[in-house]
Image (cartoon, rainbow, N blue to C red):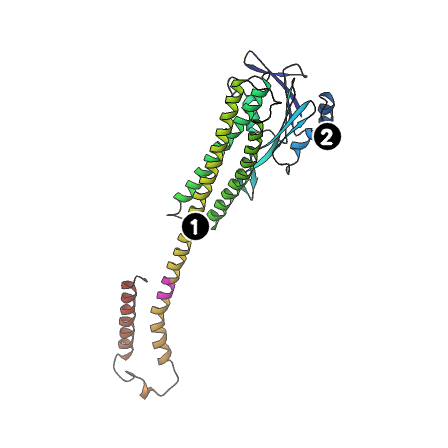
Amino acid sequence: MINYYRTDEGVIQKLKDYDEGAWVQLTNPSPEECVEIADRFQMDVADVRAALDDEESSRISLEEGYTLILVDIPTAEIRNNRNSYQTIPLGILLREDVVITVCTEETAVLQTFVDQSMKEFSTKKRMRFVYQILYNSNIVYQSLLRTIDRKRKEIEERINGSTGDSDLFDLHELESNLVYFATSLRANSMVLDRLTRYGRLQQFPEDRDLLEDVIIENRQAIEMTGIYRDIINGTRELLSTVINNRLNDVMKILTSVTLILAIPTIVSGVYGMNVDDQWMPLAHVPHGFGIIILITLVISVLIAWLLHRKKML
């Protein structure tokens, strides 16, 4: 799908076709649409389709007449029946007269501009618009990182209550999200570093200031990712320890109960043996059965008391 947008007097408008100063947005374009854009703006169709390959890594490529900037942006998905996050490539093709973005799906990074949520941006100020896209990408990263941390806190709050294997799986899923984020953010930082060195890209002083802000936000997102990964590791170890301790407590109780029940089992087993009753204690004593039951009960209670003192019951 191809959409054309342009800002006029600070208001973004959707155009029916390309016009000067417009932003061309390709969302999961067909091969025919990619060829159309490549021919129209004299670009290599492979560069137009680069962002459609999930395995493409972040990079910047200076081609004849245009520049390709490829970065990873965050997106939500359902993985293992859980709400998860991953990163997908976003291609930005920059010419002197046009900015073209290519992505496999609609993303919050670009939708912010379509919805006019981003203030003070212009599709005609192409380099500044590109930096604003990169800046917004880091803001979305940080927002999702905070969401991941909130989910971790919810799991942590349940540790004193009912916890189980599902919480461990949830923590593993959160940690996987952070791994994807960390890898993509580091790759994006290399692209940003190269942008500061390329003199071919015309930049105004305010554009350089914005690029510095983008780099700062990217570093902050990387730091947040590292911190949250360490915290999740600690939470997972705590959860595993709590589950193991609870299992040990259950095993202690079961062992203690088995030991207490072993006393009447032994007594009944001895008196149930097929031997002459003259050799059995209390066999001919009045109320002998009751006495045996009483002695067995006393011994069981005594063992239970001893186990309780040892904090095993």
Q: Which residues are magenta?
A: 252-256
Residue 254 within the segment the image draws in magenta: yes
Q: Is residue 217 left or right of residue 47?
A: left
**Disc 2 to disc 1, C-alpha distance:** 48 Å
Which quadrant is the N terminus positioned in?
top right
Residue 170 placement (x, y as % from top left): 49, 45
Residue extending farthest left: 286
Amino acid bearing label 1: Glu
Amino acid bearing label 2: Pro
Asked if residue 81 is positioned above or below residue 195 in the image, the reply reads: below
Asked if residue 127 is positioned above or below residue 237 in the image, the reply reads: above
**In the image shown, does 124 or 193 lie closer to the viewer?**
193
**In the image shown, does 267 or 140 lie closer to the viewer?**
140
Overall secondary structure of the magenta section: helix
Residue 109 placement (x, y as % from top left): 55, 27
* N-term-proximal mark, 2 vs 1: 2
Q: What residue would you read off at disc 2?
A: 31
Q: Is residue 213 left or right of residue 103?
A: left
The residue positioned 42% from the left and 47% from the top of the image is 234
Q: Is residue 52 left or right of residue 139?
A: right
Residue 202 within the segment the image draws in magenta: no
Residue 237 circle label: 1
Residue 271 placement (x, y as % from top left): 35, 80
Answer whether labels 2 and 1 touch (C-beta < 8 Å).
Answer: no
Asked if residue 86 is positioned above or below residue 17 in the image, the reply reads: below
**In the image shown, does 293 or 175 lie closer to the viewer?**
175
